Image (cartoon, rainbow, N blue to C red):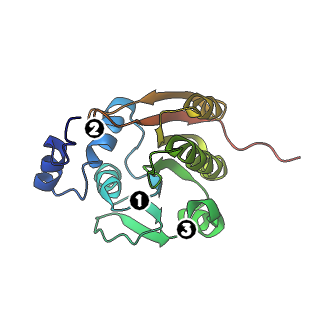
Amino acid sequence: MARRVLHDEYFKKAKADGYLARSAYKLKELQQRFKLIKPSSTILDLGCAPGSWIQVTAEIIGRGGSIIGVDLKPVDVVVPCSLHTIEGDITALDLGPLLQRVGGSFDTVLSDIAPNTSGHGDDLVSAHLCRAVLEIASRSLRPGGTLAMKIFDGAEYQSVLEETRALFRQAKGHKPRATRDPSREMYIVARGFLGPEPTS
């Protein structure tokens, strides 16, 4: 079996460009292809450590935008826009204070969360995390908002994609070039959030 190449071109490029991880180029490609993030917008970044997606997002939104990041691990990154990070579990996230902080809703929800891989059932854990992301997005996105989230291709991938399509005008899967060839990582990208379910 071929030895896994860790220090590939994107790893080296991230070091040279000042990004905290190679995953920066995954978001850059998603942004280039799908125009998910607009200047001066409000962003919720779920699973934001080590902070490379925060760095890329900050470049796009500029000083007029704001980012709230959530992760189990602390994040140490300096960006020119408003940034607030929280150490916590997204499956037990209190959205109320976050929505107050950004004035009611987010323009975009991002998630590069991956489970701690064990080699067995990782795709099912990834799907569970994606459903938690969808739940948060359904309660925090503005109508018309956008979403990008990582998922492991597997038994639940198509189901999660269909669940996403039920919430957005458009949703599709995409595998960025910066994803390692053997990886099962995919990204579900969605635009045109249809809005929260009406309350009875």
Marking on residue 173: none
Using the image as rendered, state which of residue 156 and residue 77 is in the foreground: 156
Could you tell which of marks 1 and 2 lies nearer the N-terminus? 1
Label 3 – label 1 distance at C-alpha = 18 Å
For badge 3, the amino acid type reads Arg
Position of 4 compared to 98: left or right?
left
Position of 25 compared to 91: left or right?
left
For badge 2, the amino acid type reads Arg
For badge 1, the amino acid type reads Cys
Nearer the camera: disc 3 or disc 1: 1
Label 1 – label 2 distance at C-alpha = 20 Å
SS at circle 3: helix
Q: Residue furthest left?
A: 16
Up the image or down, 96 lies above or below 18; here it is: below
Label 2 – label 3 distance at C-alpha = 36 Å
Using the image as rendered, state which of residue 88 and residue 185 is in the foreground: 185
* Residue tagged 2: 180
Up the image or down, 176 lies above or below 48; here it is: above
> Residue 15, percent across and down?
14, 55
Marking on residue 48: 1
